[in-house]
């Protein structure tokens, strides 16, 4: 496939993901607010100082910490002369972040005001930590399999990264910066990004 065709497919991918995100936003708005608030209240009751610190750290694995991990992985891939894999990880992460920002601007859902433990200035829907970490860590899991062809190692890495992704989503709700439906939408958006990318690569 030539570069023009790839750019066209990438543009189509972004457009479709934004449209799907809007559809899901309308769907999630039909969910009673009591559902989101009930779960937020549940996590609020679980809070204590040590767990607060743990959740802040876990949340960082989907933010600043993820950036540091990404830099190390990219450097390693360049060192072993796997530039295409390094660019793939960068591209997938950037696409997820762009889709998240665009959806936030379009939907403009305010952040929860239920005793947040950290302050976030942008909009709430979807969860960027959930979407980007979903794409980032599962792309690394794919690269581990792609480079090693070791099924056992790949399954272990997939399991570990899946737990990390799940904990990141939980941490965002625990910290009071996202509604549960924001996190679910983030995961779903991440799945769409990965699925669409796989289809583009295979065509």
Image: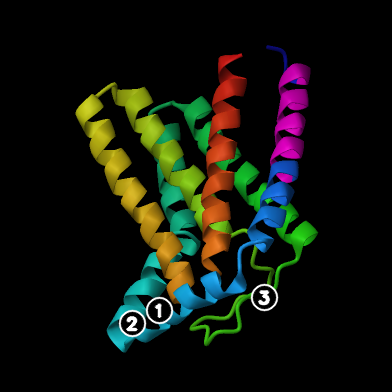
Q: Which residue is mark 2?
A: 46
Q: How is the image coloured?
A: rainbow
Q: Earlier in the sequence, mark 1 or mark 3?
A: 1
Q: Residue at x 41, y 52 (%)?
A: 69
Quadrant into which the N terminus falls:
top right
Question: Which residues fall within the magenta stretch?
Answer: 4-18
Q: Return the mark for residue 121.
A: 3
Q: Is residue 23 visible?
A: yes
Residue under label 1: 42
In terms of depth relative to the viewer, which is nearer, 167 or 71? 167
Nearest the eye: 100 or 45: 45
* Quadrant position of residue 179: bottom right
Residue furthest out toward the left = 152
Residue placed at 70% from the left, 32% from the top? 13
Q: Mark 2 near mark 3, Cβ–Cβ under 8 Å? A: no
Please tell me whether residue 189 belongs to the stretch shown in magenta. Answer: no
| Horizontal and vertical percent position of residue 46 | 33, 82
Disc 3 crowd, CA 10 A, few/some/many (<14, 14-19, 20+): few
Q: Nearer the viewer, residue 63 or 48?
A: 48
Q: Is residue 39 left or right of residue 186?
A: left
Classify residue 110 as left or right of residue 155. Answer: right
């Amino acid at each position: 496939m030539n570069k023009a065709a790839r750019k066209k497919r990438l543009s189509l991918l972004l457009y479709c993901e934004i449209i799907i995100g809007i559809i899901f936003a309308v769907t999630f708005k039909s969910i009673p607010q009591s559902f989101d608030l009930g779960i937020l209240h549940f996590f609020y009751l679980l809070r204590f100082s040590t767990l607060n610190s743990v959740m802040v750290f876990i949340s960082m694995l989907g933010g600043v910490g993820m950036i540091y991990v990404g830099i190390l992985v990219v450097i390693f891939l360049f060192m072993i002369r796997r530039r295409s894999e390094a660019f793939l990880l960068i591209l997938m992460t950037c696409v997820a972040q762009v889709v998240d920002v665009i959806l936030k601007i379009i939907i403009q859902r305010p952040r929860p005001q239920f005793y947040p433990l950290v302050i976030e200035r942008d909009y709430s829907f979807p969860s960027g930590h959930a979407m980007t970490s979903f794409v980032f860590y599962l792309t690394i899991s794919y690269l581990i399999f792609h480079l090693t062809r070791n099924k056992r190692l790949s399954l272990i890495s997939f399991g570990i990264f899946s737990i990390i992704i799940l904990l990141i989503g939980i941490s965002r709700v625990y910290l009071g910066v996202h509604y549960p439906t924001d996190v679910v939408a983030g995961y779903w958006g991440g799945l769409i990004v990965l699925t669409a990318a796989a289809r583009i690569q295979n065509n």
